[in-house]
Image (cartoon, rainbow, N blue to C red):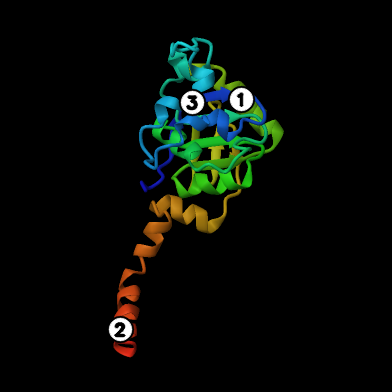
Amino acid sequence: MDKFENVSGVAAPMPLINIDTDMIIPKQFLKTIKRSGLGVNLFDEMRYDDDGNEIAEFVLNKPAYRNAQIIVAGDNFGCGSSREHAPWALKDFGIKVVVSTSFADIFHNNCFKNGILPIRLKTEEVTVLMEDAERGENARISVDLEAQTISATDGTKFFFEVDAFKKYCLINGLDDIGLTMQKVESIREFEAEYTKRTPWS
């Protein structure tokens, strides 16, 4: 997993509430076990019509937001089924931060495991950032994970809470495998000792 670096850029406004994981990545795209290649189908049913053509009105199809790395969303983002493909699709598209007042617990945890920072803020704070994001290329939202702050274009800064261990993992690019590999020498020592004590195993 890549180390999380501070993000500054255009944010895509998605004021819908209850954006669930089936909206993020529809069920027909869950056949793969690869984490790459899903970005093209992110929000598939909202991005494309029945013939596969882009729907111009959808935010991520608008020129100003095609390279957005931040989404500012309505309440309860990532609800529904617990599919890990949802953060895979977001990450593959290029999304590094999602801002909302609330997230489904499993989706929230899956974001951290896949290098995405979910930021919970108060309703009034999300409203400020949503209005800023709606200005398109004229607005830049900045996220500083180390300082735990997110800033609007005019410099208005909001502090967000984040679990210290999850923050450590993001900053250092550690997923579950990476965390295990930090203990590789201890694991080898244990295996060697265990083999000596139980040669029949």
- Quarter of the view holding residue 186: bottom left
Q: Residues within 10 Å of mark 3 (few under 14, many from 20)?
A: many
User: Considering the numbered disc 2 on the image, is that residue within a helix, a strand or a loop?
Assistant: helix
The residue drawn where x is 55% and y is 49% is: 109
Residue 143: x, y in percent?
49, 38
Q: Is residue 60 above or below residue 187?
A: above
Question: In the visual, does 75 lie left or right of 188?
Answer: right
Q: Which residue is rendered at x = 54% and y = 17% of the image?
A: 135
Residue lying farthest bottom?
197
Q: Earlier in the sequence, mark 3 or mark 1?
A: 1
User: Mark 3 sits on what residue?
Assistant: 140
Callout in the foreground (3, 2): 2
State if disc 2 and disc 3 touch (CB < 8 Å).
no
Please say whether residue 38 is visible from this viewpoint: yes
Residue 88 left/right relative to 127: left
Q: Can you identify the residue that label 2 sits on? A: 195
Residue 13 spot, x, y in % from top left: 57, 23
Residue where numbered disc 1 is placed: 130
Give how far apart the Cα atoms at labels 3 and 1 are.
Answer: 12 Å
Three-letter amino acid code at disc 1? Met
